Image (tube, rainbow, N blue to C red):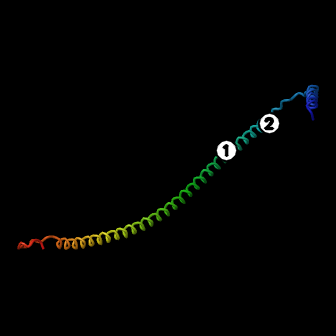
Amino acid sequence: MNIKQALASLALTGTIALAIPAAPAYADGAASTRNLILLGGAAATYLIIQHNRKVHEKYAEYDRRQAALSQENNDAWAAYHQEQRAYAQEVQVNQELKKEIAYQHGVVQQQRHELASIRSRNEFVRGTHRNANSRVAMVSYGWGDI
């Protein structure tokens, strides 16, 4: 249907609506009261339905937040346990390092002791050798140095 046909059908409908005389409306008190009660009941029903929809949306949002918090809590709990495992592993590594340091300290102490004993032997040997080369007071009878 094109625009001309749509305008023509609209004009025809408007002309027919104006040409037909409207019937007078009679006001019936019981029908009017009944219509007001029905409209009021429909409005109240609509308001109750909308209120319930909003309440259920709030409950659903609250449940979503609780689920997200529970998930975060579970993630935090899992992260806590992971940190505990990592800490236990670090403690084991530190204990192994302490053992290694104690072993190395023992080796260093042993080497220092050996070095000190070697130095004392060298000093003893140097001391006797030096005494052999040193001049001893001699009684000289004029023949010079022997």
Q: In this view, does 50 lie to the left or right of 90?
A: right
Place residue 3 in its image quadrant.
top right
CA distance separating discs 2 and 1 = 28 Å
Q: Considering only order in the chain, which callout, 1 or 2, is on the residue closer to the N terminus? A: 2
On the image, the x and y values in percent for residue 143 come to: 8, 73
Of 46 and 123, the residue lying toward us? 123
Q: Is residue 78 above or below residue 23?
A: below
* Residue at disc 1, secondary structure: helix
Identify the residue at horizontal 13%, vertical 70% (top origin): 135
Identify the residue at horizontal 27%, vertical 72% (top origin): 118
Identify the residue at horizontal 59%, vertical 56% (top origin): 71
Which residue carries the number 1 mark? 54
Quarter of the picture containing the C terminus is bottom left
Quarter of the picture containing the N terminus is top right
What is the three-letter code of the residue carrying label 2?
Asn
Q: Is residue 99 above or below residue 57?
A: below
Which residue carries the number 2 mark? 35
Identify the residue at horizontal 42%, vertical 68% (top origin): 96
Q: Are marks 2 and 1 in contact (CB under 8 Å)?
A: no
Place residue 145 in its image quadrant.
bottom left
* Residue at disc 2, secondary structure: helix
On the image, the x and y values in percent for residue 85 come to: 50, 64
